[in-house]
Image: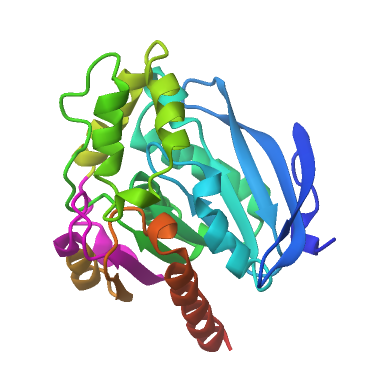
């Protein structure tokens, strides 16, 4: 078993195997407990495979660990891939905010990773990665941001009903994609279930509002980590102007455009996403010599 796949948690562990064109290794699935600002225990799901430089993947508001799967499959023969899934729509009270999720992510990096990691974040997850890097730069080796909030974003939850219908969710989740055929009906079913649980829709709106209030324009110049921005040219949630803005405001950022791609490039264009990351790893390794 590769070193990166050995258990690091004590709660729940399950070994599975993956087999792709570029990776044939062991995947460890486990649960870890994080402490919310309320002091409550927040269980988070972790999937880990590969060995080497740690790469930690952070999802968006309705994201899952599995949404990174095709990217991870192409990276795990070279690096240690760790996907962290915090139950965002299950958060309540003071735990339901960007700052609280960022604090939990810092706990995870401190306790489970053990060295500076490359943080890869999509949408809300990108914003968390930025906030973690600004507050605890020693935890972060580099950043990969895809459709990150924190600068310019158009909310997709405005006017969200207390109990969203499937039709509303199909429309809103569909806005994340340029190619609507890439939208998984299973994601709609899962979101429908979570958002119709008591407080689920309220949590989504609250997290979205907390992200919009946390504009990072004045903070980005303080983030010196090398940063790769992977942006869909057809993203209507965090439009191309947002990607351009991040590049101009961050001292060590570069921008990789994806044609015919929306707000979830790791799902719509996973091969090109992974290839851009592999080239970025080459740069990181060259600068560390």
218 in the magenta segment: yes
Relative depth, front residue between 84 and 268:
268
Relative depth, front residue between 207 and 265:
265
Image: 66 above or below 286: above
Looking at the image, what colour scheme do you see? rainbow
Q: Residue at x 48, y 76 (%)?
A: 275
Quadrant of the image containing the C terminus: bottom right
Image: 170 above or below 223: above
Question: Number of callouts in the render?
Answer: 0
Query: Where, by quadrant of the figure, is residue 21 drawn?
Result: bottom right
Q: Residue at x 44, y 28 (%)?
A: 189
Q: Position of residue 203 (x, y in %)?
A: 34, 23
Image: 13 above or below 220: above
Relative depth, front residue between 29 and 192:
192
Q: Residue furthest front?
A: 181
Query: Where, by quadrant of the figure, is residue 3 drawn?
Result: bottom right
Q: Is residue 224 visible?
A: no
Q: Residue furthest top?
A: 198
Bounds of the magenta segment: 215-242
Q: Is residue 32 visible?
A: yes
Image: 158 above or below 70: above
Relative depth, front residue between 189 and 136:
189
Asked whether, in this view, residue 28 is left or right of residue 182, the answer is: right
């Amino acid at each position: 078993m590769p070193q990166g796949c050995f258990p690091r948690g004590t709660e729940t562990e399950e070994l599975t195997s993956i087999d792709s064109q570029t990776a044939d290794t062991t995947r460890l699935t486990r649960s870890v407990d994080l402490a919310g600002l309320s002091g409550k225990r927040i269980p988070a799901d972790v999937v880990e495979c590969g060995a080497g430089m740690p790469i930690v993947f952070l999802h968006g508001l309705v994201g899952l660990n599995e949404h990174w799967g095709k990217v991870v499959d192409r990276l795990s023969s070279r690096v240690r891939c760790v996907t962290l899934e915090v139950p965002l729509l299950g958060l309540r009270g003071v735990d339901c905010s960007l700052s609280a999720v960022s604090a939990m992510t810092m706990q995870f990096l401190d306790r489970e990773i053990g060295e500076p990691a490359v943080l890869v974040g999509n949408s809300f997850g990108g914003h968390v990665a930025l906030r973690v890097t600004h507050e605890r730069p020693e935890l972060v080796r580099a950043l990969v941001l895809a459709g990150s909030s924190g600068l310019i974003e158009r909310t997709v939850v405005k006017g969200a009903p207390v109990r969203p219908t499937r039709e509303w969710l199909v429309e809103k989740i569909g806005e994340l994609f340029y190619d609507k055929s890439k939208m998984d009906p299973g994601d709609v079913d899962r979101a429908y279930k979570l958002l119709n649980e008591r407080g689920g829709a309220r949590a989504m709106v609250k997290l979205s509002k907390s992200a919009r209030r946390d504009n990072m324009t004045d903070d980005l110049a303080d983030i010196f980590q090398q940063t790769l921005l992977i942006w869909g040219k057809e993203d209507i949630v965090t439009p191309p102007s947002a990607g351009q803005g991040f590049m101009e405001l961050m001292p060590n950022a570069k921008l990789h455009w994806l044609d015919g791609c929306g707000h979830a490039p790791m799902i719509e264009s996973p091969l090109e996403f992974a290839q851009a990351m592999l080239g970025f790893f080459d740069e990181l390794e060259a600068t560390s010599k």
